[in-house]
Amino acid sequence: MLRGMVDIISRSEWGARAPRSRQTTSWSARTEFIVHYSAGPPSQTPRQIQAFHMDSNGWSDVGYNFLIDTDGKIYEGRGWLVVGAHATGHNTSGIGACFIGGNGDATPATRKAIRALYDEANRKAGRTLKIRGHRDVGSTDCPGDDLYAWVRDGMPADGAGEADGGGGGSGGGGQVPPWPGVYLSYPPITRHPAVSTWQGRMRERGWSLTVDGAYGARSRSVCSAFQREKGLTVDGIVGPDTWRVAWTAPIT
Ligand SMILES: [Zn+2]
């Protein structure tokens, strides 16, 4: 790990190829922190993304300064002070942090890690960098509606599911509401009081979704990401297991 206030998996630890060339900048030139998504599967590795950028795009190295996965692991890309290839016109001023995954895949752990990385950037810069989504500075959907909503909110730490490193376990023993006997699924939209119960619980866990009693596309996307994170069958349907684990699994 690189030493600092956040744990960062170094290039040598993830087996990065050497860059073909590199150009550095300085902290005085850094003014912004730009959040991206890879728009690919969360299972993609930094090595695969680097290979794509170097071999298909012909770039000198992986384009981003850092990459963050659904477990909240942070991988060193080009690092703090190497000019990236992630946002045209903003590669010298901006530190590019890329979430590995598509819209709706980002987890509370992802958000917590991006926030920690941003805080570390501010410490190193000695001032507060502007928070940006890629779409703020370029014509793109990046970083996806879900992550962008959080970026627009200023990347609140409490959107990360856990205010401090208390170690989870909230809502454990004996507090699981009874399984409602209705599978929450979409499409079509499921409307049932249990939907609000589940949505409220997922919000407590740090997921961004509206508690409106209607299980639609956004609820399904949160459900799938949660199932993937917890090693459940990923079907986007809240059945008895997914329901129970929402209350019993430690909040990470
Ligand atoms: Zn982007």
Image: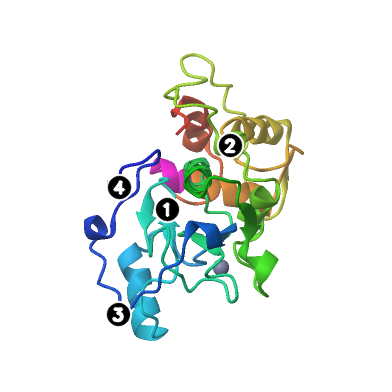
Mark with earlier residue (4, 2): 4
Q: Residues within 10 Å of mark 3 (few under 14, many from 20)?
A: few
Residue 232 among magenta residues: yes
Name the residue tied to disc 2: 157
Label 1 residue SS: loop
Q: Work out how far the residue at label 1 is from the one at label 4, CA to CA, in angstroms.
A: 17 Å
- The reply to whether residue 166 is visible in this rendering is yes
Query: Distance between the Cα atoms at labels 1 and 3?
Result: 25 Å
Front label number (2 vs 1): 2
Residue topped by disc 3: 20
**Mark 3 beta carbon near ligand 1 (under 8 Å):** no
Q: Check the image and report above or below for 174 versus 247.
A: above
Depth order, front residue of 206/227? 206
Identify the magenta region: 227-233
Q: How is the image coloured?
A: rainbow
Q: Which residue is mark 1?
A: 69
In the rendered image, residue 219, in percent from the top left (x then y), is placed at 64, 46
**Residue at which label 4 appears:** 2
Q: Earlier in the sequence, mark 2 or mark 1?
A: 1
Query: First in sequence: mark 2 or mark 3?
Result: 3
Q: For residue 221: magenta?
A: no
Is disc 2 in contact with disc 3, using a CB cutoff of under 8 Å?
A: no
- 192 lies left or right of 54: right
Crowding near the residue tagged with mark 2, few <14, some 14–19, many ≥20 C-alpha atoms within 10 Å? some
| Callout 3: SS | loop
Say if disc 2 is inside 8 Å of ligand 1: no
Q: Residue at x 30, y 67 (%)?
A: 47
Contact, CB < 8 Å: mark 4 with mark 2? no
